[in-house]
Amino acid sequence: MIMKRFAIVNAGRTNSAFTLIELLISLAVTAMIILMAAQVMNSTTAVTRTGNKHIDTDTQARAVLDRMALDFGKMLKRTDVDYYLKGLATYKGHGNGHGYGQGKVGKDQLGSDQIAFFSQVPGYYPATAFQSPLSLAAYRVNNDSTSASYLQLERMGKGLLWNGVSSLNTNTPIVFLPLTIAATWPPATNDFAQGQGPPSASQDSNYETIGSQVFRFEYFYLLKNGRLSASPWNTDAGHTTINGLTDVQAIGVTIAVIDPAGRAIINAANPSSLFDLASDLTDFTTTPGRGVGQQNKYIGGLEAQWNGVLFGDASRGLPGVVNTGVTSNNTPLPPEAAKGIRLYTRYFDLRTF
């Protein structure tokens, strides 16, 4: 009787054990679960990394464009003062504000813009008894390859005074026509480009780096007739002068921003790559005709063209540097670094300011 009970108990224990096949199946299922979890974690990490890059560029763009909003909002719109703005007649000389760069530049790739104008915002000036919230505001992308601010957006806020405020004041006053910004403050209109004089003509202690991640800066005009233009006047009405910006409804600004890690990777691949990429991002132009890349007559057109250069444009047969890994000058551009570039456009309405 005792032996029979033992046999029954022993048989029960044998039936409750796992077989080798069951163990193998369990291991396979566990391995699949671990693999799926790892893939989810990798995807989450990639999304998070991309999100962090976008947070970096979004933060930078917001700070830059908000600063511009203050300067444009307080711009002096008068017919008796000078502006340094780009126009259609030429991309060199006074009135264009266009940095025509160096190296690989062509008909429609002339580099980042420059702009300078008087604005009722505080600037940098020596401490005196007669200070005035008035300055010369200027923006440029530094073109000096030896500078720590190379291919970074700079802003000048040079504190000025109204002319004749006090004979005892040593601050520089603003100038009225026929005196020009270019003649009075050359650094506001020069940017180390060929033909602009010695490097000292482009340097000023009042320049500061406002956008260390901004490597391309382009602006254009929305006229009161509803058209986008590369000149700050209405040529359809026969106008050929700025005339206090009376024809301009808003100034549009488009910037290209890259996250710091992406810039470091691109510079490590080839120091010329980022400059070549900036050159590939075409200038704003209202040139008539049907040539590819010759017109930016609709809102968002410039940003769409830049996106085509970066990420491809099937309608124009452009693969994009992210797909090719090189610029049009065949300098390497790591695709993952290029994915960290984002474009931003904002219109600054001059009518309501």
Image (cartoon, rainbow, N blue to C red):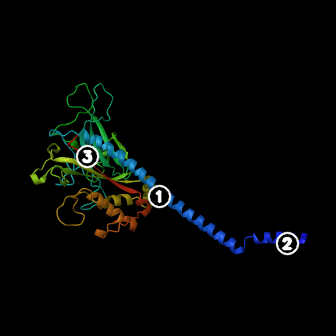
Calculate the distance from the C-alpha at mark 2 to the C-alpha at mark 3: 92 Å
x 22%, y 31%: residue? 162
- To which quarter of the image does residue 41 belong? bottom right
Q: Identify residue for label 3.
A: 348
Q: Secondary structure at mark 2?
A: helix
Q: Residues within 10 Å of mark 3 (few under 14, many from 20)?
A: many
Q: Position of residue 298 (x, y in %)?
A: 22, 58
x 36%, y 46%: residue? 62
Calculate the distance from the C-alpha at mark 1 to the C-alpha at mark 3: 33 Å
Q: Which mark is residue 7?
A: 2
Q: Nearer the viewer's eye, disc 2 or disc 3? A: 2
Q: Position of residue 259 (x, y in %)?
A: 42, 53
| Residue 266 left/right relative to 301 | right
Q: Which mark is residue 47?
A: 1
Calculate the distance from the C-alpha at mark 1 to the C-alpha at mark 2: 61 Å
Q: Residues within 10 Å of mark 1 (few under 14, many from 20)?
A: few
Relative vertical location of residue 14 with respect to residue 302 in this rendering, above or below:
below
What amino acid is found at the position of numbered circle 3 in the picture?
Answer: Phe
| Residue 141 left/right relative to 352 | right
- Quick one: label 2 or label 3, which is nearer the N terminus? 2
Q: Position of residue 257 (x, y in %)?
A: 37, 53
What amino acid is found at the position of numbered circle 1 in the picture?
Answer: Val
- Quick one: label 1 or label 3, which is nearer the N terminus? 1
- Quick one: label 1 or label 2, which is nearer the N terminus? 2
Relative vertical location of residue 69 with respect to residue 265 in this rendering, above or below:
above
Quarter of the figure with the C terminus: top left
Front-most of 163 and 203? 163
What amino acid is found at the position of numbered circle 2 in the picture?
Answer: Ala
Q: Residues within 10 Å of mark 2 (few under 14, many from 20)?
A: few
Asked if marks 1 and 3 touch (Cβ < 8 Å), the reply is no
